[in-house]
C-alpha cells in the first residue's frame, strides 16, 4: 500500500515539474491561444465528472456524487473561461470601423 502511494506521489511531482517546464518555455505571444485551447479541452473533464456523479440505487448520494458535482462545476468554469478568453483574443484582430 505504501509503495502505491509513493509511486502516485512520484508521478504527481514529475507531472508538476514537466508542466512547469513546458509552460515556462512557451513565448508570451503563444501563451493565450494555447491556454484557451487547452481550457476548451476541459469538456472531457466535464464528461468524466458527470460519469463520477451518477447516482445509483446502492449509493443514492455518496462522496463520489459530491466530488463529481464539484469537479463538474469547476470544469465548466474552466470551459466557459477558455471560450471567453478566446473570444476576447479574436476581438483584438477584428478591423476597427
Image (tube, helix red, strand yellow):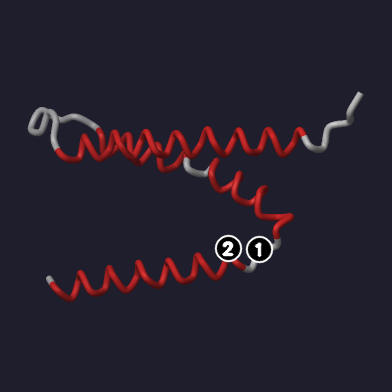
Q: Is residue 74 left or right of residue 19?
A: left
Give the camera-side residue of 67 and 59. Answer: 67
Residue 63 at x, y percent in the picture: 16, 40
**Quadrant that contains the C terminus:** top right
50 left or right of 33 in image: left
What residue lies at 39% left-to-right and 38% top-to-bottom?
A: 74
Considering every residue shown, the one lying at the far right of the view is: 97
Place residue 1 in its image quadrant: bottom left
Q: Which residue is drawn at the image coordinates 50% and 65% (left, top)?
A: 19
Q: Report the disc number at residue 23.
A: 2
Q: Residues within 10 Å of mark 1 (few under 14, many from 20)?
A: few
Residue at point 40% right, 72% down?
Answer: 14
Relative to 36, residue 96 above or below: above
Query: Contact, CB < 8 Å: mark 2 with mark 1?
Result: yes
Task: Specify whether 33 is left or right of 10.
Answer: right
Instruction: Characterize the local packing of mark 2: few (<14), some (14-19) or many (20 or more) Cα atoms within 10 angstroms.
Output: few
Q: Which residue is mark 1?
A: 26
Q: Secondary structure at mark 1?
A: loop
**For the point 43% across and 66% down, which residue is it?**
16
Q: Secondary structure at mark 2?
A: helix
- Residue 49, quarter of the rendered image: top left
Amino acid at each position: 500500500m505504501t509503495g502505491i502511494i509513493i509511486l502516485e506521489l512520484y508521478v504527481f511531482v514529475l507531472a508538476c515539474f514537466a508542466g512547469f517546464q513546458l509552460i515556462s518555455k512557451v513565448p508570451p505571444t503563444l501563451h493565450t491561444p494555447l491556454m484557451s485551447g487547452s481550457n476548451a479541452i476541459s469538456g472531457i473533464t466535464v464528461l468524466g465528472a458527470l460519469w463520477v456523479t451518477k447516482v445509483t440505487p446502492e449509493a443514492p448520494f455518496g462522496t463520489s456524487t459530491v466530488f463529481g458535482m464539484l469537479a463538474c462545476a469547476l470544469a465548466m468554469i474552466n470551459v466557459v473561461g477558455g471560450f471567453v478568453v478566446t473570444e476576447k483574443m479574436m476581438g483584438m484582430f477584428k478591423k476597427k470601423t
